[in-house]
Image: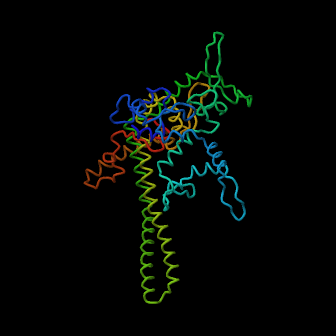
Amino acid sequence: MLDVATRLCGIHAQVMSAAELAVMTRQLRPRADQVRRALADRRLVRVWAMRGTLHVLEPGQASAFQWTTTQLHRELVRRGLNTPPSPNRPSKLIGLSSVHRILTNPYYKGDIRYKGATYKGTHEAIVPREVWYQVQSVLDSHKSAADATQIHDHYLKGTVYCGQCGARLIICNSRNRHGKVYPYFVCSGRHGGAGDCTRQAVLIEDVERLIESYYDRIQISGQTRQNVAGMMHAQFDQLMAADTQELAGLAAGRDRLDNERVKLLQAHYADAVPLELLKQEQARIGAELETINNRIAAHHDEYAAARANLEDSIGLLANVAGIYRRCNDANRRLCNQAFFTAIYLDDDGEPRVTYRQPYDALCDPEVQANALNWAVETQKSDEVQTRAGAVPPVKGLNLATSGWLTGLEPATPATTTRCSTN
């Protein structure tokens, strides 16, 4: 149970029954009242944390969630932390943007960024990877001002937009003559007098129902999940086959450098190469070998990570509608942020969404139709090859052995911290 709280970087506990449910749905053998028992034993603490709401946290995590980036920056400035001087720039107090870059830089967990992609570095990690991911979760919980919960809090705030002008929907409360309050979503463009938007206000509870119903549309059947997964794994296999020539070239280059290193050493023993030249050449060969080995390792790691992400993402679509209905408000917010970049409400009352990757492809009807056609063609090809006694298709194209006959619903670190719904 403690590992669930750590992995989620805190459990929303505004209502204790919701905290118990959040833990139980993530365990193979759930037990009732385990959160309350952990609180009584002080293994967990209940504190005001993200967005000013009550969360259950491990004692070591509780203090971290109390700090914002601005507060951390002020403390570092108070302690006199300066940037290192350079030939063109003197030392000065660290800036807020520098603190944020430090906290989000993957170099500290042992990775490097190159041309927009992240690769595993050869240097030793400065902080454990789990600590770095916890920091990212804290930063995600302290959203920007555009998505912050301020006077009127709601889990859809910052996610829903006006379908007519594209402006963000804000919350306004209307009170009737009897004192009853009706909360509405109102177009911020019309409310602020900018533009000529005519979008009418809509009750928040109506928007909640619309979005809850929309999740039924993106939930896909087991057969569709099997088809999409099989087709994409086949595409992975084709990409890897296309890269075989490149990998062969890298391996040949590695063998060439190894032979060159041996010959260089032999020439040095024969007094044909002086020691200084030997050192220079050995350094050059070592650097080239390291580059080649990193490229080969990154190639395999990239495909392995992509396949794992595909499995997690498709598995989450197996019962996403039921998951969303069982979520509390905090987890619904995370779920919407994980699936959608924006939800637009059109004048006809129908939501229109833009998906985040990879759900923009997985939820595309055209992609699902192509996967169905691919599955049919693959089955025909299998039958022809079986009658001819040929070798069966490669594993990526054989749905019976690809592991997609059952719905998989694990969570990646990304969905664990951002969409705690599995």
Q: Residue at x 44, y 60 (%)?
A: 242
Position of residue 367 measured from the top left corner of the image (x, y, whole percent): 47, 42
Q: Is residue 303 above or below residue 244?
A: above
- Locate the N terminus by quadrant: top left
Specify whether 181 is left or right of 47.
Answer: right
Residue 261 placement: quadrant = bottom left
Residue 347 placement: quadrant = top right
Q: Residue at x 55, y 56 (%)?
A: 113
Q: Is residue 233 above or below residue 199?
A: below
Residue 192 placement: quadrant = top right
Position of residue 350 measured from the top left corner of the image (x, y, whole percent): 56, 27
Position of residue 264 measured from the top left corner of the image (x, y, whole percent): 45, 82
Instruction: Indicate the colouring scheme.
Output: rainbow
- In depth, the one of 61 and 143 nearer the eye is 61
Position of residue 69 measured from the top left corner of the image (x, y, whole percent): 61, 44
- In depth, the one of 215 and 331 nearer the eye is 331
Q: Residue at x 64, y 51 (%)?
A: 98
